[in-house]
Amino acid sequence: MLVSPLLIAQTMQNQRVQNFDERNEERFQNMDYAKALKQYQKKYQKESNPEKKEEYALQMAKCFQKLNKPQKAVELFNKMDTSLLASNERATILYADALFNVGEYKEAEKWYKKAFNMKGAEHSSEVYQKLKNLSTISPLLKDQDLFEVKNSTFNSDQDDFSPFKYNGGYVFSSNRKAKQTGGKKYAWDGGSFLDLFYVDSLGSVNNFSSKVNSKYHEASASISPDGNMIAFTRSSAKEQTEDKESNLQIMIATKSSDGEWNKPKEFLWNKTDFSTGHPSFSSDGQRLYFVSDRPGGVGGSDIYYSDLSSNGKWSSPTLMGEEINTIKNEVFPVVDGQKLYFSSDGWGGLGGLDFVMQNLDSLYEKPLHLHAPINSSYDDFGGTKIDMKRYFISSNRVTNYSDKGNDNILKVEKVFFKGIVIDKYERTPIKDALIEINGKTVTKSDSSGLFKVRFDQWPDLSPIIGKKQSYASDTLAGQEAEKHIEIGELIVLELSQPFIEGHVYDSLTKKPVIARLTIKERSTEKEKVVFSDSTGYYRIPVKAEEHYDFISERPRYFTRRQASNTQNNYRTVRDIAMNPIVGQRIRIYYNFDMSNIRDDASHSLDTVVNVMKYNPTITIELSSHTDIRGRDAYNQTLSDRRAKEAFDYAVNKGIASERMTYKGYGETMPVIDCKQKRCSEAEHQLNRRTEFYVTGYINEKGYFGSDYNKFYPDSLSEVLVDGDKEIMRSNFNSITGIFVSLIGGVEGYEVKAFDDQGKLLAKDKTTEEGVFNLTVSNQYKYRLVLEKEGIEITHRVITLEDFDGKSNFDITIYK
């Protein structure tokens, strides 16, 4: 059978392509990413087949990701055909990862969602976790203006990382060419091998020690507090696994009597078939924390520790639990007192490796993410604390000083710290509060209660004082403030304002009443209007040693007027009993056979006039009566004159005539029946009277205006109420959210909003689509809890800053 030369040539070409692909894939698997990338780039330039060109571009992007150069990967993806990209789940995820790692979070979310919604997606669980992490990162990006990030003065144009204090300067790791003990290039990224270097207080950089450094990798070290022992990480060609990847080993050296380092010895618990590295001494030097990917861990690289016994030997490694380690990688541990700082790509965050902190004396708590700009979308690791406001960190982020994606040591300095002033009891922000340090006002709180203070205005951890007129001030000790500032939390100043509180209730039934309370301050005549809630409770901030006049109003109740003096009390209680308008009568009396108003009767009529003035929505009837003496017709006429006289008196006092009717009843409605017995003069006097009683109501909605609906919250949907039907009396915020679950079934979950002290503010249930809406009073912090049948599923914390000056906040909660 004859075979054409063309077919033979094509077959040979296909074989060459196949051989190239296999060889370069082997380079990639052997972590020789730099060489694999170079070969893929050559093929990409020469390839004419669009599909094959896309394949090489994708492989190049993978190499860039492995070499921690996500910006290059993004640039490659942006040149690809998006329709081809969107049909490849793995490529879509890789593109989203690259976008995430350069901080393009919105765009990353879009591509993750494309991957998640692909038909037949095989990696939906992985993508779901990435979407879940994206939903939590916005708080980590706040307040970056509080910091300044600068390049360290001892960086080179190569990789520099993991500095720590020693002997007045810093020891750090670098693959710079100058003063290096090695020189051979390292295959992974094409750079030189790493050494430990030392920079002194004058900025002079030297190789740390020829006894410690070798011709291979030495990096990520720690020196004991007494300065007599160094533990560091080494990787050499002698220590290789079957796939030729050199594993990390911890080496330990001690100082000789002349102050020189002795020859390093292997850490007792090294093994050649897995890595052990990144050592860090505890504050007392008796414990060594380190990283290992040995079998039996939680996953990836985990943090362990070993204790130094009295005989100088290190105990068997103890794996730290899942309060530290994840199924991914935890690396570069650093101990500062009782705080363990480390980097992880398993606790979520801004992308790549992120700094997290765990309190060693409260391991039950979840590790705390450090905020940007300490963390970024790139790898952030290997840091050290200079002092409370300054840090050295290592990062491969793109900066003004470096855009090559190599590791650099950055100096991060907090220029400002931030706080908030709130009402101690209401938990609401207070604006225009003065912030004092050492007797000097340094700033004041803004309309959201927030304030910023420059560190140079806060010497020697001085106490921080918040003040405002009519409030009791609050003082925060400097050491307490430092704890919050160090972990990126707001410091909180809680000012106390005197207040009057009480309950409004029905005088007959004793049940609570929703009432409108108008309170006037006598010294200034300023008025405040508040409402009691559905439990009858009200609370009003006031001044000390001040007199206040109360007017309590509600439809179908008589207006109540009271006064209160706060004296020097922080808390004044004033309960208010309101009289319903039922069966209320006021009587005036007459001399025998007379219709004119007696002096004592005018006082009673004045009371009627005042009742009418203070209750402008009621109408009344004035009914007059006589005793039984005299003829019936005469008594009827006499009672008519008496009723008219009372009516005219009220009109002359300013009461509108249309609000009153009058009628004489003669002797037909006696208080005492004198026909059945002989009455005394005093008893006849009781029958000679004019009474008033309420006949109806006019213009109630007009008088109370928009407040009218607030008295009847159960029947009017437009009244703002929380989950317990409480009327929202203060400024409010709206939280709208959606609950997303990988397994579906998002309906019927209960979402509750609590304030920072655990008080329930609002609650709602998720709809069939997982949507919920909460209306909450204007607090400085909320804890959102998602529950099912009383069991907490997850929670989120939202602060006033998350609203970004708006009254609404949208949130996505992932299970």
Image (cartoon, grey):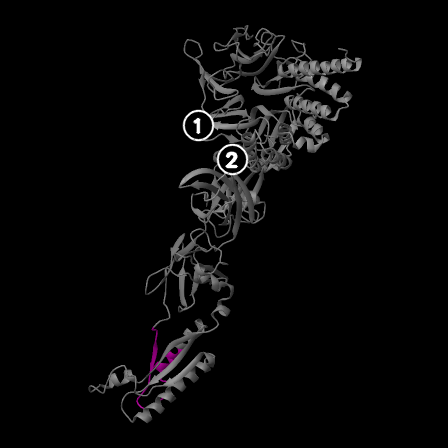
Front residue of this view, candidates 204 and 163: 163
Q: Who's the residue at 56% across and 42% down the image?
A: 802
- What residue sits right under mark 1 in the picture? 363
Residue type at the position of mark 2: Leu
Q: What span is in magenta?
A: 583-606
Dot 1 falls on a residue whose secondary structure is: loop
Picture quadrant where residue 500 is located: bottom left
Q: Which is closer to the viewer, label 2 or label 1?
A: 2
Is residue 650 depicted above or below 723 in this figure? below
- Estimate the x, y position of residue 163 in percent, counting from the top left: 59, 20
Within-10-Å neighbours for mark 2: few <14, some 14–19, many 20+? few
Residue type at the position of mark 1: Leu
Q: Is residue 402 left or right of residue 617?
A: right
Front residue of this view, candidates 768 and 173: 768
Q: Which mark is residue 742?
A: 2
- Nearer the N terminus, badge 2 or badge 1? 1
Q: Who's the residue at 44% across and 9% down the image?
A: 313
Dot 2 falls on a residue whose secondary structure is: loop
